Amino acid sequence: MTEKTKVLVCIKCRMPGESKETPFDQRTGGRLYREVAAAAESADDLEIVPVECFSVCKRPVTIGLAAAGKWRYLYGDYPLAAADDILAAARIYAKSQTGIVPFEERSESMKTGVVSRIPPGL
């Protein structure tokens, strides 16, 4: 069986105006995680993983894409209701042998939201 592509969603992310006292599950990140997980519920190619913090607080909500042997990415600036966009980006990433998606094949959020790229195996 092929390893699933992991979609990592920061559940600690909060938008400006959200209190630090807001529980993670009620923050924008926690709510987006639930949206993405629900949208991918029947997907056998993706695993949705909650992450407590990527330390990219100026770019909420931050997500990551990862798979064995591939470059990994962090993307920022995902709002609520972005689940379909996130899953589409994950599937574009999954089709790449190396994790590097040519610029012209990227979704708009993949073009504008890149925070970092991390080499495989580290």
Image (cartoon, rainbow, N blue to C red):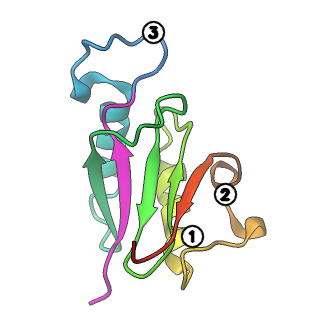
The N terminus: image quadrant: bottom left
Q: Is residue 109 above or below residue 77?
A: below
Residue 85 on image: x %, y %:
54, 51
Q: Amino acid at mark 1?
A: Ile
What numbered label is drawn on residue 44? none
Could you tell me which secondary element the residue under label 1 belongs to? helix
Asked if disc 1 and disc 2 are in contact, CB closer than 8 Å, the reply is yes
Disc 2 or 3, which lies upstream in sequence? 3
Q: Amino acid at mark 3?
A: Gly
Q: Amino acid at mark 2?
A: Ser
Q: Which residue is mark 3?
A: 17
- Picture quarter containing residue 64? bottom left
Region in magenta: 1-13
Q: Which residue is mark 2?
A: 107
Q: Nearer the viewer, residue 68 or 44?
A: 68
Could you tell me which secondary element the residue under label 2 belongs to? loop
Q: Is residue 44 left or right of residue 83?
A: left
